[in-house]
Image (cartoon, grey):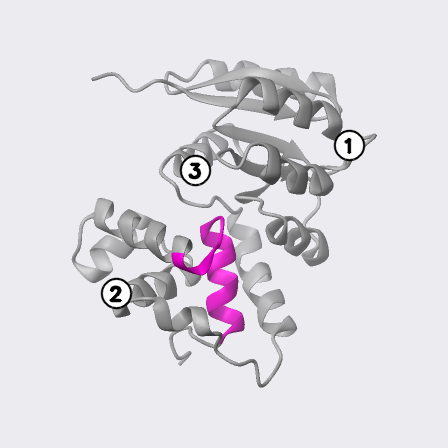
Amino acid sequence: MTTAPARILLADDLPLFRRAIATLIDEQDDMEVVGQAGTGVEAVELAQVLRPDIILLDVEMPVMDGVTAAGRLRDVVPGAKVIMLTVLDDEETLLGAIRLGAYGYLLKDLHPDDLFTMLRSAMRDESPVAPSLVGKLLAALRETRAPATPVVDEAATLSQRELEVLRLVADGLSNKEIGVALSITEGTVKNHVHNALAKLGMDNRIQAAAYIVRAGLGRPRR
């Protein structure tokens, strides 16, 4: 059975950049650009009509910035995966986007093949984050964690396997890598992540990773 291409909405205030990205994406068999927006407001309006699977959202846009738009998009199209695409790599913007439900965070200087790899990871329900930002994200989370942060009650609802899987998510492993580490299938990993997110009331893997770090539930660091 043929799987329908992932439907992608692009939002960037630079028409030339936006169209270039759209051309590259449309050359792929498993993804297609269904709409383009030049502002955060346009992105929200188009998303409501087009119902895309993935929204590539620039951080700096007129009328409504990308971080604000990410929060609006979480409410109007909760099933869409919002991925920030930007030249900014500062922790404040990164954490702000994640808190508002952004599914991933990529830098604009990435190679086209890396963009496609990251988009396909989102299609597999993994949260794409630029490799150069992973360490910065985790470091920022650890710095904002209170020394005596209590383990919240939600953790008690997680099974031991779900907690084990989320610890590996917090270490930056993909579903495939987690499956290999735990000797389970990639599909089983995906189910564990889905169930854990539902129990914790979270939108994506990045929020779960942040929770693990802040609650002090990660694996002991050697």
Reading the chain from its start, which is encountered first: label 1 or label 2? 1
**Measured from the top left, where is residue 104 in percent x and y?**
53, 44
Q: Residue, x 42% and y 78% (percent of image)? A: 221
Of the residues tagged 1 and 2, which is closer to the observer? 2
Q: Amino acid at mark 2?
A: Arg
Helix or strand or loop: what does disc 3 sit on? Answer: helix
Q: Is residue 84 above or below residue 174?
A: above
Q: Amino acid at mark 3?
A: Ala
Q: Residue, x 59% and y 31% (percent of image)? A: 56
**Measured from the top left, where is residue 75 in percent x and y?**
60, 38
Q: Nearer the viewer, residue 174 or 17?
A: 174
Reading the chain from its start, which is encountered first: label 3 or label 2? 3
Reading the chain from its start, which is encountered first: label 1 or label 3? 1
**Measured from the top left, where is residue 176 in percent x and y?**
27, 48
Q: Is residue 154 above or below residue 79?
A: below
- Find out whether the residues at labels 1 and 3 contact each other: C-beta distance under 8 Å: no
Q: Residue furthest bottom?
A: 148
Separation of disc 1 and disc 2 at Cα?
41 Å
Q: Please tell me whether residue 168 belongs to the stretch shown in magenta.
A: no
Picture quadrant where residue 15 is located = top right
Picture quadrant where residue 57 is located = top right
- Find out whether the residues at labels 1 and 2 contact each other: C-beta distance under 8 Å: no
Label of residue 61 in the image: 1
Q: Nearer the viewer, residue 25 or 5?
A: 5
Q: Residue, x 70% and y 26% (percent of image)? A: 12
Label of residue 128 in the image: none
Q: Amino acid at mark 1?
A: Met
Q: Which residues are magenta?
A: 199-215
Label of residue 122 in the image: 3
Q: Decide: few, some or many residues near mark 3? Use Cα within 10 Å; few <14, some 14-19, many ≥20.
A: many
Helix or strand or loop: what does disc 1 sit on? Answer: loop
